[in-house]
Amino acid sequence: MKNFDYNGIKVPKLGLGTWKSKDESCRKSVSEALEMGYRHIDTAQVYENEEEVGAGIQDANIPRSDIFLVTKVWRDKVGKSDLKNSVQQSLEKLKTDYVDLLLLHWPVDDVPLDEQLEALQNVQKEGLARLIGVSNYPVDLLEKVREELNVDIATNQVEYHPFLTQDKVLGYLKKHGMFLTAYSPLARGDVLENSTLKEIGLKYGLNPVQLSILWEYQQDNVVTIPKSEKVEHLKSNLEAIEKELSKEDMQKISELQSPK
């Protein structure tokens, strides 16, 4: 498994997303993923599955220090008086003393951005989060965070897949040594029927899902977190990243993208 190194902290480039993953199936998929070699688990307060994710981590009996765990603060908890309490509640559900990465889930207009980021930084200073970042932020907000407010964020988690470009966001993140975390890397299943992906995949013995994951995994400064609850899919994703695409095929896949 390749890692992205952010200031000495290793971030596994393939993770497990858990959006819409619920109850026992969530718990089971997290434990199974960890047991077969995944070390990056992504959740969020609004997913309402932090308890199940925490239970799955305990079931797997993998040292906590070997796991890169991510959660996100929801829009109604980003104020100075709410953020820390919400994070402490998340940690209780996750059965851990800290997360490796804590994100503001969406831009919020009704709370000043500097207040949100100060609260986020305070949680980091107290050791409740090793890294902090944002999600679904456009470049102009990233610029404000880093250049106007001078806050060290590690990532921006955004939708990214073979049909959706994030060139502007990715370019900015690369320039500043940050990484893009890609959610919905399979375009909610749309990659399955694409003829170009099918054709390229045949050359490598990969299906369109595997090819899409490998295309993201192989990119610099990109971490990908496909959601999966089935053992065969979890294994399939790991098998995909053992291959390597040519520069030409990487480019062919990129050419499928449309601007956001």
Image (cartoon, helix red, strand yellow):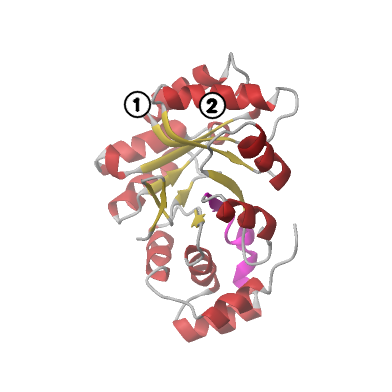
Label 1 crowd bin: few (<14), some (14–19), many (20+), radius 10 Å: few
Q: Which mark is residue 180?
A: none
- The residue that mark 1 highlights is 97
Q: Is residue 54 above or below residue 114?
A: below
The residue under the point 53% across, 64% down is: 216
Specify whether residue 183 is in view: no
Say which of marks 2 and 1 sits in front.
2
Q: Name the quadrant containing residue 46.
A: top right
The residue under the point 50% across, 17% down is: 85
Element carrying mark 2 = helix
The residue stretch that appears in magenta: 178-192
Specify whether residue 117 is in view: yes
**41 vs 132, nearest the viewer:** 132
* Residue 2 position within the rendered picture, expressed as x and y whole percent measured from the top left: 37, 60
* Residue 108 position within the rendered picture, expressed as x and y whole percent measured from the top left: 70, 30
183 drawn magenta: yes
* Image quarter of the C terminus: bottom right
* Image quarter of the N terminus: bottom left
Element carrying mark 1 = loop
Q: How many marks?
A: 2
In whole angstroms, how far apart are the C-alphas of marks 2 and 1? 16 Å
101 drawn magenta: no
**16 vs 217, nearest the viewer:** 217
Q: Is residue 215 above or below residue 166?
A: below
Q: Is residue 166 above or below residue 46?
A: below
- Looking at this rendering, what residue extends furthest in the top direction? 81
* Residue 165 position within the rendered picture, expressed as x and y whole percent measured from the top left: 68, 62
Left or right placement of residue 204 versus residue 250 in this view:
left
* Residue 107 position within the rendered picture, expressed as x and y whole percent measured from the top left: 69, 35
Left or right placement of residue 69 versus residue 66 in this view:
right
- The residue that mark 2 highlights is 120
Closer to the N terminus: mark 2 or mark 1? 1
